[in-house]
Structure formats: C-alpha cells, structure tokens
Image (spheres, rainbow, N blue to C red):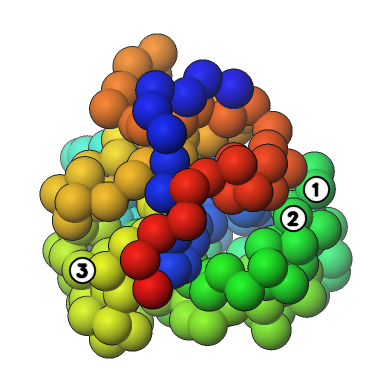
Amino acid sequence: MKTEQQLIKPQAMVFDMDGTLFKTETLLIPAYHGVFDKLREEGLFTGETPPDSLMLGSLGMLLEDIWKNVMPEAETHVHRRADELLLQLELEGLEKAVSELYPSVPETLQALHERGVRLFVASNGLEHYVKGVAAAHRIAPLFDGLYSAGEHGTRSKVDLVRRLMEDNRLERIWMVGDRSSDVEAGKENGQTVIGCQYAGFGKEDELKGSDVLITDFKQLTGLYDSAAAGTP
C-alpha cells in the first residue's frame, strides 16, 4: 500500500463496480463470447470473436465506447444489439451464481458500514447490471445508493459522481476504483482517490494521480481507521 499524504475521514466512500468490488471477468467473458455467437447467428457479425483483452482493456468506459473499441467497423444498430445481448447474458449468469466479488469485499464493506461510513457505487455500466451484481452478491443493503451511467444518462464518471454528491449533500468522499476514469472522477470533483491495483485491467500508469494505492480491498478499513477526523 502506498500513501502519499495524511488522509481525512470521508463522509462517504464511492466505489467503482467492475475491477473494484466485482471480479468482472468471471461473468463478463462467458457473456462476451455469447454475444458474438448470437450476433453471428443473427447475421450481424462475421469472423472470429475479438480478443478478450480488447473487452477487458475497455472496462471503465461507457458501453457505447466499449463497442467502438471492440468492433469499430460495426454499425450503430449492431452495437445497440450487443448492449441488449450483453445485459441479458450477464443477468442470466448472475442468476446461475457463477460470478465472484474480490476477496474480503463483503466483510470490508460491512466493517465500513458499521463504522458509520455511507457507501455508494458509481459505475459507467447499465442500471440493471449494476443493481443485479449488488443484489446477486447480497451487498446491496450496505449501500445508500447504486448510481450508474445507464440510469442517470451521464456522459462521464465525473458527471455521475458530481450528481451523486449533490443528491446526497456530500462534501468529502473517497473515490475508490481501478481505472483512470475513477481517478478523474475523484480529482475533478476535488476529492481523495484510492486506487485499486489488484484487478490488473489497466495500463501501467492507469492510477496516476491517486492519493493512495492499495493491493487488497481489506486495506480500506485500516486506511479509514488511521485517517484524521474531519469536520462533520
């Protein structure tokens, strides 16, 4: 764990979902291959399924931008059909209980909740996906809000986090995530950023600008306990 400064206790922690709380590839990769199988079956795509690395490397983007990266030659209606199929297959996967959270996520969230920290999710994913993951893994009751770009129609995570803070009258949060979009969302809103290094989806400098880098989710409780008290 790398800490650049003395932290101040936050009013709330705001978490990215994919690559931070949720081990995305356990659900995403089977669904991803299912999407392309169905697109080929429907005559909307030909050729081999693009490499898994293209999809995993795009996590953190808005879904419409992910498809532009994964299949740039496809037309917009194909991208929108891929949206529908991916959500359908991921929700089916959640029902089959084949996906995983990262180690210590439920216990750490519970410990933070018991300390009085308000917990939120801010994700660039679709509404039913974000809420479905939280429900399937029984962590939804710990959160004060599950915010998604899909539900709120935001164009960036900066906007989504700003909306979350305004809605809940928050002035001091820790933004916790694994991608540059999380760092940007925290810093552009004047907040502390905790960068998560354990997922390994991003580039080497993905978390540049984070105030703290952690290698295990459970380190959050120690960070919170050792942080200085802030104004109410």
* x, y percent for residue 48: 49, 32
Closer to us: 121 or 46: 121
Is residue 144 in sight in this rendering?
A: yes
Between marks 2 and 1 in the image, the one whose residue lies nearer the viewer: 2
Residue at numbered disc 2 = 108
* Quarter containing the N terminus: top right
Q: Amino acid at mark 2?
A: Thr
Classify mark 2: residues with Cα within 10 Å, few (<14), some (14-19) or many (20+): some
According to the picture, the residue beneath numbered tag 3 turns out to be 162
Viewport quadrant of the C terminus = bottom left
Q: Of all residues shown, which one is farthest toward the top?
A: 204
Q: Tell me the residue that label 1 is attached to.
A: 104
Q: Residue 202 versus residue 15: which sits nearer the camera?
A: 15
- Label 1 is placed on what type of residue? Ser
Q: Residue 183: image x %, image y %? A: 30, 40
Distance from Cα at disc 2 to Cα at disc 1 = 6 Å
Hey, what amino acid is under mark 3? Arg
Q: Is residue 85 visible?
A: no
Left or right: where 104 falls relative to 109: right
Q: Position of residue 61 (x, y in %)?
A: 31, 48
Quarter location, residue 59: top left
Give the class, few, some or many, for how many residues have Cα within 10 Å of label 1's Cα (few <14, many ≥20): some
Position of residue 52 in the picture relative to residue 8 (left or right): right
**Quarter assignment of residue 76:** bottom left
Q: Measured from the top left, where is residue 124 in percent x and y? A: 35, 60
